[in-house]
Amino acid sequence: MSRHDLGHPALPEERRRDVRRAVRLEVVSLGYLLTCVAVVAATMGNSQAMKAAWIEDLLSLIPPTAFLVAVRVARKPPDPEHPYGHHRSVATGHLVAAVALLTMGLYLLYDNVTKLVTAEHPSIGTVQLLGVTFWQGWLMVAAMVYTGVGPVILGRLKLPLAERLHDKVLHADADMNKADWMTAGGAVLGVIGIGLGLWWADAVAALAISVSVLRDGWRNVRHAVDALVDARAHTVDDTEPHPLNEAARQRLAELDWVREVGIRVRDQGHVFHLEAFVVPHQEQVGVAQLEGAAHLLEELDWKIHDVVVTVVSELPEGKVFVTRGDNRS
Amino acid sequence: MRRLPALPLVAVLLCLLAGCGVGIPSDPDQSLERIRSTGQLRVGVSPHPPFTDFPDGLDAPPTGTEVDLVTGFAEQQGARPVWTPGGEEHLVELMKDQQLDIIIGGLTSQTPYSTDVGVTRSYLTREEPTSDGGTGKRSYVMAVTMGENALLTELEHYLDEVQP
C-alpha cells in the first residue's frame, strides 16, 4: 500500500505527486496558521475585531486537518467490512470543512451585526514595544497583513491540485483561505477606519465579507450533503455535472453490440463509482464483452475506479435518467 | 484575488495622510479637540485611597495619586479638570452618556467595566496582598470614553512620560 495512492492502486504517477504536494501544502498551512493564532493572540489586546480574527484563525485549522485525516483514511484498501474502500472519507471531510466555513460566516455576521446595533466604539490605545510607544492599530495592521499574505499564496496553490485530484476538501479549504485573506484585508481597512475616527468601519467591512463567507459555506455544506446522498458526480467546484458522466455513456454507446445504455455515477471522493445498464442488440452477450466494456471505462480516466456493467432487456426506469444533451445511439 | 494589492497601497496612502496632519488615531466624537478648545477635562472620581480621596468632603476638590496624574494631564492639554464624585457604576453610566472624559478610582486592568469603557494600558503594576492571604499582581489603569482613541492615546503617552 502506497502512502499517496488515495486507496487507488492504479493512480497515475503525476497524481501521486499531486497528493504528496497537497499533503505538504496542508502541513505548511497548519504550521503557518498556528503562528497566526499566536501572532494575533499576542497583538489583539482587548480589541473585539482582533478577537474575531483570532477565532477565524482557529476555525481555519479545521479544513487542513480534515484533509489530512481524509487522505489518511482514503488510502486504506477495501476489506470485507468496507468493500467499497474508504473513499467516502473525502465526502465526510468535505462536510466537516464546509461546516467550519459556514460557522465562520455565521460568527462574522452575528458579531458585526451586534457591533453595529449596539454602536460599539472600539477602543484602541497605544502599545509599548522595545521602548517605543505607538498606536496599537499599526501593530494590528501588521499582524493582519502577516495572516493575510499566507492564505492568498496557499489558496492559489491548492486550487489546481484540488481540481486535478478531484478533492473537495482541498477545494473547500481553498475557499477557507479566500475567507481568511478577505477578513484579514477587511480587518486592515477596519482598523485604519477606526484610526480615522470611523468607529463603524471595522464592522461594516467585516459584514460585507461575512456575506461572501456565508455564501461559500452554505454552498459547500449543500454540496457535501448532496454527495453523501449519492448525487450524480459533479465537477470539483460543484458548478456542473462532471463531464465523465457523458463521456462514459458515450464510450459504451459506441460499442457495436450495444443498442442502448444508461449509467449512473456517484462521487465516492476522489474516485467515481459507476454502474452501467446496457441493452444489447442480441440476446446473447459474452463475459469478455462485458469485461471489455468495464475495462474501456476504467481506461477513460483514473477517477473511474469502481465499475459495474450489467445487461438488461430495457433501461430500468427510476435508476438511470436520460438528461438533455444525452443523445441516444 | 485581484483586490488585495490595493490594501498595502491604501495603508501606505493612509500613513502619508497621517503624516500630513490627519491624525491617526482620532476621536469619533472629537473629545480631545473639545477638551483643548473648552479648556475642561471632565473627570469622574470614585474614592479609593491612596489613588483618589475626598478628605474635605465631596464638595471639596479630591486628592490622591491619580488625581495628581490627571491634573497634570489636564494642564498638559491646556485644560483644567472638572471633578464629578460618584460610585463606579454611576460614573460608568455618565461616561456612556458622554458626560465624562476620564474615570479614576484605583481601577485595575481586571475591571468588569472594560466592555463599557476604554481602559488605558496600566501605568502602575505592583505586588499586593490579596483577600486569600497571598500576594498578587495588580495593574492600575484609568478609564476613557469608549472609542475615543486620540484621547486614550494622548493619555497613555502622558502616563508613560510621568510614570516610566
Image (tube, grey):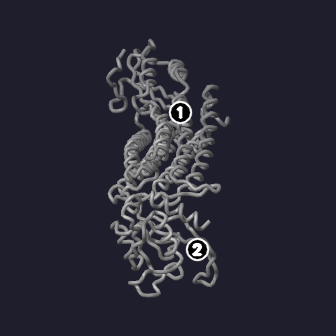
Residue A323, horizontal then vertical, whole percent: 33, 25
Q: Which residue is mark 1?
A: A156
- Tell me which residue sits at (47%, 26%) in the image: A309
Along the line of sight, the residue nearer the viewer: A216 or A230:
A216
The amino acid beneath tag 2 is Arg
Using the image as rendered, state which of residue A303 and residue A217 is in the foreground.
A217
Residue B69 sits above or below residue A29 on the image: below
Q: Amino acid at mark 1?
A: Arg
Q: Quadrant of residue B82?
A: bottom left
Q: Chain of mark 2?
A: B
* Residue A284 shows up from this direction: no
Point out which mark residue B138 bears. Answer: 2
Classed neighbour count for the residue bearing mark 2: other residues with Cα under 10 Å, few (<14), some (14–19), many (≥20): some
Residue A91 in percent (x, y) is at: 49, 41
Q: Residues within 10 Å of mark 1 (few under 14, many from 20)?
A: some
Q: Secondary structure at mark 2?
A: strand
Residue occupying the point 53% across, 42% down: A148
Q: Quadrant of the C terminus of chain A?
A: top left
**Nearer to the camera, B21 or A101:** B21
